[in-house]
Image (cartoon, grey):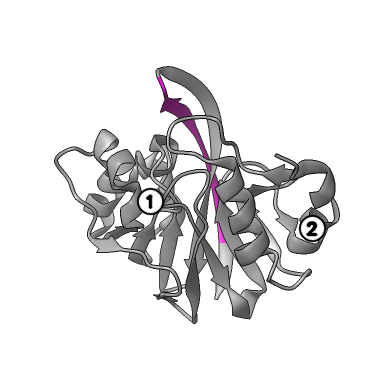
Amino acid sequence: MRVERVVTSGIFSLDGEDFEVDNNIWLVGDDEAVVVIDAAHSAEVIAGAVGDRRVELIVCTHGHNDHINAAAELAERVGAPIAIHPADAELWAAVYPDRAPDQELADGATVDVPGGSLTVLHTPGHSPGGVSLHAAALRTVFSGDTLFNGGPGATGRSFSDRPTLLRSIEEKLFSLPDETVVHTGHGDSTTIGAERAIWDTTSAP
């Protein structure tokens, strides 16, 4: 089991505003098959990175458009189901009013990946249905927009709540070992230890 990063660029839209963003897409698997985490902006680019491997599942860490806007097209291209936490159903429907996700993610559930598994950690706050995915065998967590290199994800917009986000990070992510690599939804990766070390200066409401 290994991790590969693909970066795509596009528009994040929320509350009537548009922002240009670069998104990280993570492929977890082996030479035969992968799970795709966050199908953003370009199904063509993601499918090119997958190559001739089988896609077992497309997992959405949350429902913001920049993390799901290539999911349906990619699902059609590769014949894979899409999974998202049901608390982000409204965000999903804003992008896909006529296409429901195929599976629901739940806290504590296991997502099988080639060569191992991911544990779903419900980490709301950036959005109600935000999740992180812990790959214990890789000492890695995929945090979506819950935790970044340098601090918590953004709040202050529709569907977000800062106290909830901080509680999610403290209870679900900071319970992981310090050496756990944090692969984020945007920007550079970090570690749980590095983020915990700066927590006191970033977490005050």
Residue behind mark 1: 47
Do we see residue 48 in this rendering?
Answer: yes
Q: Quadrant of the C terminus?
A: top right
Q: Is residue 82 left or right of residue 189?
A: left
- Given residues 69 and 9, the one toward you in this image is 69
Q: Amino acid at mark 2?
A: Arg
The stretch in magenta equals 4-15
What is the number of callouts on the image? 2
- Given residues 171 and 35, the one toward you in this image is 171
The correct choice, above or below, for 180 with respect to 88 in the image is below
Secondary structure category for the residue under label 1: helix
N-term-proximal mark, 2 vs 1: 1
Do we see residue 146 in this rendering?
Answer: no
Label 1 CA crowd tier, 10 Å (few <14, some 14–19, many 20+): some
Q: Is residue 59 left or right of residue 79?
A: right
Q: Residue at x 73, y 47 (%)?
A: 149
